[in-house]
């Protein structure tokens, strides 16, 4: 009999799956001239850890992100960075290249669009 899987976190393979996903994502961001400036730290390890913990929690894993950082407040936390359609598209392209599961991709599309806080310059 197949084990019953209670949520996306478990179905995806737990913390290790999300760690690999985020590592693959940030490997692509590191070489992206449009997105790299959004991450001011020379070392992307802090951003990697925060996104990993957020995704683990969002998809049904432990609530470590909230315990360490409080409510995600994604739009507020990203407000200092100029995020337009081009940045959203680049983020989504890198995340979907790193992601393997349709449910994750659907979320990333919605979340990346919600981060847009600047209109395109004409």
Image (tube, rainbow, N blue to C red):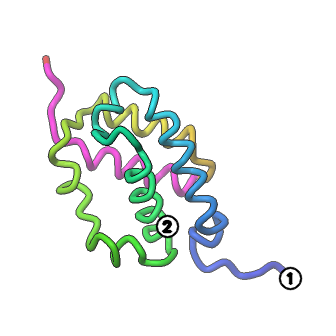
**Quadrant location of the C terminus in the rendered image:** top left
> Residue 103: x and y, percent?
54, 57
> Residue 59: x and y, percent?
49, 68
Q: Residue at coordinates 20% horizontally, 40% vertically from top-left?
A: 81
Give the CA separation, mark 1 to mark 2: 27 Å
Q: Vertically, is 70 above or below 42?
A: below
Location of residue 67 (image quadrant)? bottom left
Span of residues in magenta: 102-121
- Residue 24 shown in magenta: no
Q: Which residue is mark 1?
A: 1
Location of residue 1 (image quadrant)? bottom right
| Sequence order check, earlier mark of 1 and 2 | 1
Dominant SS of magenta comes to helix
Q: Residue furthest front?
A: 42
Q: Report helix, strand or loop for mark 1.
A: loop
> Residue 69: x and y, percent?
29, 70
Q: Residue at coordinates 81% horizontally, 78% vertically from top-left?
A: 2
Q: Which residue is mark 2?
A: 56
Q: Is residue 72 left or right of residue 44?
A: left
């Amino acid at each position: 009999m197949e084990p019953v899987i209670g949520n996306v976190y478990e179905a995806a393979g737990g913390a290790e799956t999300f760690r690999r996903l985020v590592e693959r994502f940030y490997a692509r961001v590191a070489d992206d001239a449009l997105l790299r400036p959004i991450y001011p730290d020379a070392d992307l390890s802090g951003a990697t850890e925060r996104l990993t913990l957020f995704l683990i929690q969002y998809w049904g894993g432990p609530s470590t992100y909230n315990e360490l950082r409080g409510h995600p407040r994604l739009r507020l936390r990203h407000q200092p960075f100029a995020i337009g359609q081009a940045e959203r598209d680049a983020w989504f392209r890198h995340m979907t290249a790193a992601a393997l599961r349709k449910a994750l991709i659907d979320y990333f599309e919605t979340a990346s669009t919600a981060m847009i806080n600047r209109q395109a310059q004409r």
